[in-house]
Amino acid sequence: MITRPALVNAWSPVAYDLVIRQQPLAARACGFGERDRRVIDPPPILQLTITDCATKAPRADQEAIFAVTCKLAKAGEDVGEAGMPLADIAPGPSQLPLTHYLMGTTAASPFQGKDEHLVPGTFFVFADLSCRYPGKYKIQFRLLRIDPRKLTLTSDSSHPVVASVETDVFTVYAPKDFPGMRASTALLKALHDQGLYVSLKKGTEARKRKRRASQRGGAVGLSDGSEVDAAEFLDADPTELTESRMIAPGRGKRRRRES
């Protein structure tokens, strides 16, 4: 991961930094179809930190609107320098075709919430990104500081990129080689529980366990004397099983199959 924080300008007392809290690891190539589309897994999550250059203490910037944009890059390409206007960043010839490789929502607004450790922060979540073709890629992110006073219908001024960061290299697999989706992380679940609109996933392994349990037709005995289907037990939220209904040792038994 490469991070390049930058100042809004040479005399600004504030520094901005983007930290990748969740790295993308894999994706399934989706071609040009929408029906069989798979998102990059897990979804990249970034956190914004603003610090005072003199004291190094956290500092707020209430006068600005922030947004993060992203683009796909091949492994080995470098990010552009932060601090330059977005309009001044022109993609090179080798980057132009990659604009067609990435599908989905390539810009994110900030989400104020607490992480899985209950630490408050400002997060940017990219949960709707897909890649069309197999290969080795990384995602480049740029933080835009938008001055509301310049948001007019007649304004043609650009907004500065005040920080940039890129992910580690991840693999986009052909459909037959894709290892499967992972279960949603604790960080994503925490943000979801606070109102972030994002789908949670149980992961490929959880579905396989449920399918195997369903095929065996097993039942799981609970300490209160009741029984639940094994597949239903694996699919349940552990918080829904109270202490009085925890699994009882030795009570699991196999249901007799109908002939």
Image: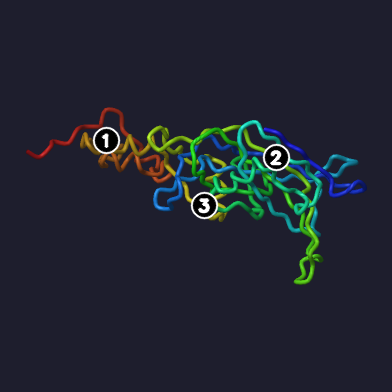
Mark 2 is surrounded, within 10 Å at the Cα level, by few (under 14), some (14 to 19) or many (20 or more) other residues, namely: many
Could you say where residue 240 lies in the image, as x and y percent from the top left?
40, 46
Local crowd at mark 3 within 10 Å, few (<14), some, or many (≥20)?
A: some
Foreground pick, 254 / 30: 30
Residue at which label 1 appears: 213
Quarter the N terminus occupies: top right
The reply to whether dot 3 and dot 2 touch (C-beta < 8 Å) is no
Instruction: Using the image, tell me which numbered label, if any, was put on residue 165.
Output: 2
How many numbered marks does the figure carry? 3
* Mark positioned earlier in the residue sequence (1 or 2): 2
Residue 51 vs 135, above or below: the answer is below
At x 79%, y 67%, the residue is 155
Please, what secondary structure does the residue beneath circle 3 have? loop
Q: Disc 1 and disc 2: Cα gap in Å?
A: 43 Å
Which amino acid type corresponds to the residue marked 3 in the rendered image? Answer: Val
Q: Does 45 sit left or right of 224 as displayed?
A: right
Residue at label 3?
198
SS for dot 2: strand
**CA–CA distance in space, label 1 to label 3:** 28 Å
Q: What residue type is labelled 1?
A: Ala
Question: Where's the C terminus, which quadrant?
Answer: top left
Residue pushed farthest right?
Answer: 11
Marks 1/2 in contact by CB < 8 Å: the verdict is: no
Q: Quadrant of residue 146?
A: bottom right
Which badge, 1 or 3, comes first in the chain's sequence? 3
Q: Residues within 10 Å of mark 1 (few under 14, many from 20)?
A: some
Q: Where is residue 156 in the image (x, y as percent from the top left)?
A: 79, 64
**Residue 60 placed where, x, y %?**
79, 52
